[in-house]
Image (tube, rainbow, N blue to C red):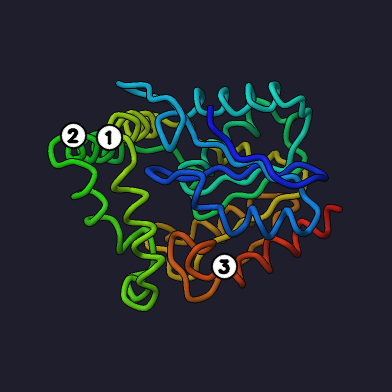
Amino acid sequence: MAYTDEGRGESVVLLHGHAYDRSMWDGQITTLAEQGWRVIAPDLRGFGESRVTEGIVYTEEFAADIVALLDELGLETVILLGFSMSGQVAMQIAASYPERVSALIINDTVPTSEDAAGRRRRHVAADGIVRDGMETYAQNVLSKMIAEENVERLPEVAERVREMIRTAPLEGSTAAMRGRAERNDFTETLRAWDKPALVIVGDSDAFDNGAGQAMSELLRHGELAVVPASGHTPNMENPSEYDAALGAFLARLA
């Protein structure tokens, strides 16, 4: 598994979303390392520079991969941040390996499993990627991955997001999409979580539909940070506000 490991201090692990790679966190890696944290950002299996598994990769497998990386690095516990698809990976780690997570940060994600219609949509989307390719997929989803108005307002960010998705391995993207269709429901995981937790959501996230607020209310010690002027990828759309919210939460843990 390819990963970035920078800084010294308590470890914060940043997990990227579907069809992204660890470069989405470049700004946060620099900022957090300067603030005295050790920052580890892997490329999930099938993305970036990590190996590709064809067919289907389940959320439990992504979670096991991350725990194996922690073992390799000799890290017993970490602060874990998961974005979008990897918010579900982070929740799976919290469910299956709670002793490895000292604080949980879930970013623009949902805790629920897919119903039958949702599972079909995921598989249809994967079939579409196979048929049309990653470039078409990147163009089709761009205005949902960042706020629609930010596609024009932030052209450099839009191009970085488009390029990440366009160059993501097709086999890895479809394997993750099919695995995500079969993910677990993490509602009870969040309800039972008794450690610090932060939910981050962009104020214009097209996928949120109230999930951020609901997750923060499920968590016993949950905090909610809404990042203004951003959609599904607030760390890139409004990094100053995102970093301020994340940094304030982490400072309370130090």
Q: Is residue 89 left or right of residue 182?
A: right
Rounded to the nearest angstrom, the CA distance separating label 3 from label 2 is: 33 Å
Query: Reading the chain from its start, which is encountered first: label 1 or label 2?
Result: 2
Q: Looking at numbered disc 3 in the image, what kind of residue is underneath it? A: Pro
- Residue name at image x 36 percent, y 65 percent: 158
* SS of the residue under disc 2: helix
Name the residue carrying label 3.
Answer: 239
- Residue name at image x 34 percent, y 23 percent: 56
Identify the mark at residue 243; answer none if there is no mark.
Answer: none
Q: How crowded is the residue under tag 3: few (<14 C-alpha within 10 Å), some, or many (20+)?
A: some
Identify the mark at residue 170; answer none if there is no mark.
Answer: 1
Query: Reading the chain from its start, which is encountered first: label 1 or label 3?
Result: 1
Name the residue carrying label 2.
Answer: 130
Q: Are marks 1 and 2 in contact (CB under 8 Å)?
A: yes
- Residue name at image x 73 percent, y 36 percent: 101
Q: Is residue 66 above or below residue 105?
A: above
* SS of the residue under disc 3: helix
